Amino acid sequence: MRNLFVGVIIAFCVLLAYRQSFAEAPSGASIIEKSFNRDDGKDSYSKIEMTLVDKQNNLRSRILEIYSKDFGDLTKTFLEFSKPADIKDTRFLSIEEKNADNTQYLYLPALGRARRIVSSQKNLAFVNTDYTYEDMQRRRPEKDAHKLIAEESLDGHSCFVVESIPRDGASQYSKRISWIDKESYLVLRVDFYDKKVQKTKELRVKNFEIKQGIWTITQVEMENLKDQHKTLMKLLEINYNQGLVDDLFTVYRLEKQ
């Protein structure tokens, strides 16, 4: 009888501890919100080396510069390629909207003018990379339903694993699964699933560190599993909170020769 009584007490304590742990676990939505709103500066400038890797392991290298600035709780991003010659002066502008997809423009030197990327084009590849135009915009938390599905280690980092499913079906993806570092709240990995719920792409952060007091991704890889193609990006230079001028984030600047 004594052993039975002890067993019941132990079982009760285990159940209580489990329920308390479950109750204390943050929700998927709160994790995504915290990651989305983490400090990344009021503005930033970065210089990036981009490498495209095909299935034969052939490499193509590019250099681009990215400018980003907060306008209230919305962000605008201006991107320009400087090397090689065949993509030099190609520019991209993404303007975040509160209750809609970003307004995006692509400037191609051969055309001499910017063209707007419409909603039906958001699933197309961005200048032959493994990123689509949809991937080139921040995914606002309210667009998805989020669920914490696990807590696990990824490359030695303790992470929350959150499943995010689009609320309106407008995305090219049926869901995303994200690994979010518990310390920095950086997204260290994302698995992308197509409309048939087949995993189609995988994004992995290869390295990150603190730069100017801000957690910063320094190497990242996007792999297209279907095409066996990768886009690697390596940070060459970063500067935060420079006071970038508003006029940089305009179609006029996009088309300026």
Image: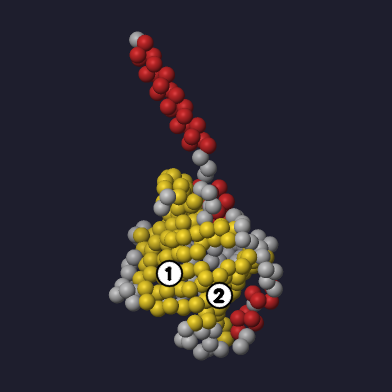
Asked if disc 2 and disc 1 are in contact, CB closer than 8 Å, the reply is: no
The residue pinned by badge 1 equals: 232
Residue name at image x 42 percent, y 27 percent: 14
| Residue 128, position as x, y percentages in the image | 42, 77
Count of residue discs = 2
Residue 225, picture quadrant: bottom left
Residue 234 percent location from the top left of the image: 47, 69
Q: Residue furthest top?
A: 1
Compared to 206, does 126 lie above or below?
below
Q: Taking 105 as reference, is 102 above or below it? A: above
Q: CA distance from mark 2 to mark 1?
A: 15 Å
Write the residue at 35% across / 10% down: 1
Residue underneath mark 2: 65
Residue type highlighted by circle 2: Glu
- Mark 2 burial class by Cα count in 10 Å: few <14, some 14-19, many 20+: some
What residue appears at the point 47 percent right and 29 percent down from the top-left corner?
17
Where disc 1 sits, the SS reads strand
Seen from this angle, which residue lies furthest left?
Answer: 56
Secondary structure under tag 2 reads strand
Quadrant housing the C terminus: bottom right
Q: Amino acid at mark 1?
A: Leu
Q: Is residue 78 visible?
A: yes
Please provide percent x and percent y for residue 165. 46, 54
Does residue 66 appear to the left or right of 225 in the view shown? Answer: right
Where 154 sits versus 169, above or below?
above
Q: How crowded is the residue under tag 1: few (<14 C-alpha within 10 Å), some, or many (20+)?
A: many
Task: Give the residue drawn at x 62%, y 85%.
Answer: 256
